[in-house]
Image: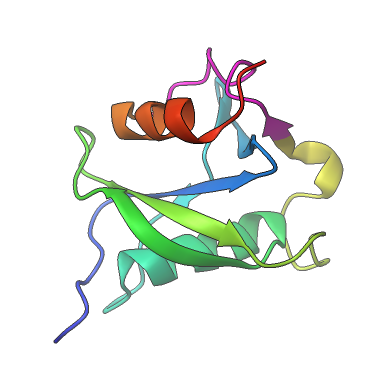
Amino acid sequence: MTAERAEGVVRAVVVYDGRLLLVPEKDGWGLPSGTPQPAETPQATAARVVYEITGYLVDGTEPLEQRDAGGGTAILCRLLTGSPSDGGRLGPDHLRWASAEEAADTPLPAPVRHYLQGHTPSI
């Protein structure tokens, strides 16, 4: 069995304690996202991107969607560390852990919203 190579933008969906990890974008907040390196799987891309941007170690576990309307993939990631390392481009004060309710105005792909509705506590 061969691993699927990532194409397009890979969005990392990191949920911990009912909250979603968001990073600043030009027009607000969004998911940690990036493009794959040659021969990199979507799961490996998600884990690398989260670490490079935030310093958190995650395990890209499963795709929430194979291809979204924007030509990318959303990958559910499991948080492996309780605090970020110094290696991320953004410090902890530039990151946001948002409840599903707080993320309601954040532009998220439909499968991500669907996942959050079923896997995060209601407030």
- Image quadrant holding the N terminus, namely bottom left
70 inside magenta stretch: no
The residue depicted at 45 percent of the width and 60 percent of the height is 46
Rendering quarter of residue 65: top left
Classify residue 43 as left or right of residue 87.
left
**How does the figure colour the protein chain or chains?**
rainbow
In the rendered image, the residue lying farthest to the left is 1
Instruction: Give above or below for 50 relative to 22.
Output: below
Identified at 80% across, 60% down, the residue is 82
Assign the magenta stretch its main secondary structure: loop
Residue at (40% x, 26% y) in the render: 113
> Viewed as shown, does residue 31 lie left or right of 74?
right
Query: Residue 62: x percent and y percent?
Result: 36, 59
Q: Residue at x 52, y 20 (%)?
A: 106
Numbered circles on residues, count:
0
Q: Is residue 91 or residue 121 the one in the foreground?
A: 121
Where are the magenta residues, as a range?
97-108
**Residue 56, position in %: x, y?**
70, 61
Residue 57 x %, y %:
65, 67
